[in-house]
Image: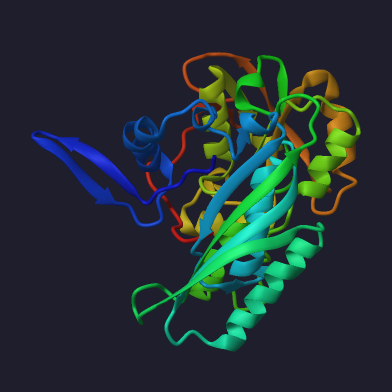
Amino acid sequence: MNLSFGACPIPVEGGDVVVLAHGGGGRLQEQLLDKLIMPIFANDVLTTRHDGAILPTFGGKTVVTTDSFVVTPRFFPGGNIGKLAVSGTINDLAMCGARPVALTVALVIEEGFVLAELRTILHAMQEEAQSLSVSIVAGDTKVVGRGQVDGLFITTTGVGEVVATNPVLPRRVVPGDAVIVSGDIGRHGMAVLCARSGFLDGEPLMSDVASLWRPVSALFAAGLDVHCLRDATRGGLAAVVTEIATSASVTVELDEPLIPVDAKVRGICELFGIDPVHVANEGRFVAFVPDTMADRVLDILRGQPGCHNACRVGQVVPARIAPVILRTAIGVERILDRPFGEQLPRIC
């Protein structure tokens, strides 16, 4: 259910010390979720640990999800916080096999925020929602004093209708499944990093931010039995695959040479000492599908906007020594884990 919190309880003698981890993410976030939040809120819906909650009270056909967006800078090559807030929530619905139906929006605005900028952001939200015939049906606005929020924070909640014939859940991932990514990875995180630091003076690196319902719906329209989907946001490909492999009690073997990374993204990652598999994406997803359907899935995805370089990057095997094992170009295997903390805070 896309639960992300920016703190982690570190147990010490005599009690817990709560360490605020700027941006959240990584194993610190996972510890907070497992040790504090999930035990308090635990219920059968929440413990599926998916990007959205499929509500049994509505016949299992209604999905709800919510997310908050605090990206800085608010405008970056390829998008802005408004487009990101709408597409990000739509994508969480899509990962549950649900057609997005409606959104609600909550705005927390700092006193003195420029109205022209707010207007641009709101138009971006409306345009992204309208492109998929999604309505923004309710919302809330709060204005707080200067310095109490960094300009503008947005929370969006989405409601969707399940259209997938079979459940799209981590528990359906089994040995023999193929692992497919819908396009090259790492663009969003590196685009925001460059925009934030002014690193690139020439042609900017564009974020991949986009709504993913169209390529996902194409898979369902073709009658394919998609076992699980997950958009590779915070923590990137490594975090997504680790989460799903852990939930399904399997191991995912990834082939590093097959993972698509744009040359510019790879170069920037090398300069900053960041592994592309740990970099956030906002327009890419990972699909777990039966091996016999992998070629058909790739054919469909490569015909969709933004998915022309979709690739099969690995396979699911019975549980081994770790949830994810990465095979390098020279055939060496290493354990791949999510980073301990968030390498790039405030990227979404």
Picture quarter with the C terminus: bottom right
Please identify the quarter of the rendering in which residue 123 is found: bottom right
In the image, what residue occupies the spot 73% across and 54% down?
Answer: 211
Q: Is residue 133 left or right of residue 21?
A: right
Q: Position of residue 177 (x, y in %)?
A: 71, 20
Residue 304: give x, y in percent of width and height: 87, 48
Q: Residue at x 35, y 30 (%)?
A: 39
User: Looking at the image, which residue is at 52% across and 72% down?
Assistant: 73
Q: Nearer the viewer, residue 265 or 222?
A: 222
User: How many numbered discs?
Assistant: 0
Given residues 2 and 29, the one toward you in this image is 2
User: In which quadrant is the N terminus drawn?
Assistant: top right
- Residue 86, image x, y percentages: 66, 60
The image shows residue 261, relative to residue 189, as above or below, that is above
Q: Position of residue 325 (x, y in %)?
A: 54, 25
Q: Residue furthest front?
A: 57
Residue 232 appears in the figure = no
Q: Residue shown at 62%/62% (left/top)? A: 138
Residue 326: image quadrant is top right
Residue placed furthest toward the left:
14
In-image side of 336 versus 93 (left or right):
left
Measured along the vertical axis of the image, is residue 210 above or below residue 16? below
* Visible residue check, residue 1: yes
Relative vertical location of residue 234 with respect to residue 116 in this rendering, above or below: above
Residues 308 and 33: in front is 33
- The colouring scheme, among rainbow, by chain, secondary structure or one colour, is rainbow
Asked if residue 82 lies left or right of residue 287, the reply is left
